[in-house]
Image (tube, rainbow, N blue to C red):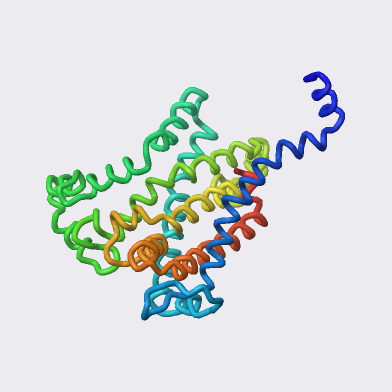
Amino acid sequence: MLNRISTYLYRRPTLVLLLMLVPPLAWFVVVYLGSLVSLLVNSFFYLDDFTGKVVNQFTLRTYAQLFEPASLDIFFRTALMAALVTLASALIAFPLAYYNARFATPRWKTILYILVTLPLWSSYLVRVYSWKLILAQEGIISWFAHVLRLNGLLDWYLSLPLVGGPSLSVSTTGVFLVFVYIWLPYMIIPIQTALERVPRSLLEASSDLGATPNQTFWTVLLPLSFPGVIAGSIFTFSLSLGDFIVPSMFGNSSYYIGKAVLSFQGTSGNIPLAAAFTMGPIVIMITYLLIARKLGAFDAL
């Protein structure tokens, strides 16, 4: 019986392919796309201000709230934070990825790769709570500032309106630092992969033709490895865009998209507005992914 089934499937590779793809695709359609469709449908409903109940009636009044100054401020603040985290991660990741791809011995390459991915082996919440202790007013950074007699400089920085707060653990700077730490491995690995694909012969040819190391970097190495930077930015930007745990733990009263969605859905019960807010990052990321695809970022994933 098993031999007959095996022979039957062997002669029909298309059927085997369908049997392998249908279960995961069905799961993807039902769970993932179904959730997105549910969000999209709920975003066209609205919350009745008098009864506090969701009215299942098609309207654009919920989307109109996204264009109010408070909502636009949330979108701008979140997108700016995600962009700054992506830029900082790229600047930190590129030198490390370049050294690991070009100069590290096989042994050191393995060690550095383990060190880069080691934080991913622990729980996300454990890493976040660890930074809560590090950045606290009684944490190690404040202790170092006290030892080095930099208390005045730290207090001055925390007094700044946009980046400061009561302490580093409750400030925009704290949100930025934790985001960079959490998502940095997702930037290093794609850049390193892209750098390893750049042939050494091209760099040697550039040098033989009289180009300086600086010219070789800007005209040969960076353009060829840039898809890796874009690939890494997909992770850092999208993950920062939708995260709500870090802004809730380290942020001040200013809302980010994830924190706003949690508040609308959990506190006020305004599910339509929460669903409408989630459509914003989806549209941003679809546009970003289309641009990244044009730049060849998926080849470095």
Residue drawn at x 76%, y 37% as measured from the top left = 17
Q: Check the image and report above or below for 71 versus 136.
A: below
Quadrant of the rendered structure where residue 121 is? top left
Q: Quadrant of the C terminus?
A: top right
Quadrant in which residue 269 is drawn: bottom left
158 vs 43: above or below: above
The residue lying toward the viewer, choosing from 131 and 276, is: 276
Toward the viewer: 51 or 269?
51
From the viewer's perspective, tell me whether residue 177 is left or right of residue 166. Answer: right
Q: Residue at x 12, y 50 (%)?
A: 149
Residue in the picture at 44% in, 31% down: 112
Question: Is residue 210 visible to us here?
Answer: no
Residue 243 picture location, percent across and down: 41, 55
Using residue 206 as the reference point, say whether residue 36 is left or right of it.
Answer: left
Which quadrant of the rendered structure holds the N terminus?
top right
Note whether residue 99 is visible.
yes
Q: Residue furthest right?
A: 11
**Could you say which is closer to the camera, residue 288 or residue 90?**
288
Task: Judge from the rendering whether residue 161 lies leftward or rightward of residue 138; answer left or right.
Answer: right
User: Residue 174, percent across and down?
Assistant: 29, 55
Instruction: Please state the horizontal and vertical placement of residue 183, each as a whole percent of the image.
Output: 43, 47
Q: Position of residue 284 (x, y in %)?
A: 54, 64
Q: Quadrant of residue 283?
A: bottom right
Q: Residue at x 74, y 37 (%)?
A: 19
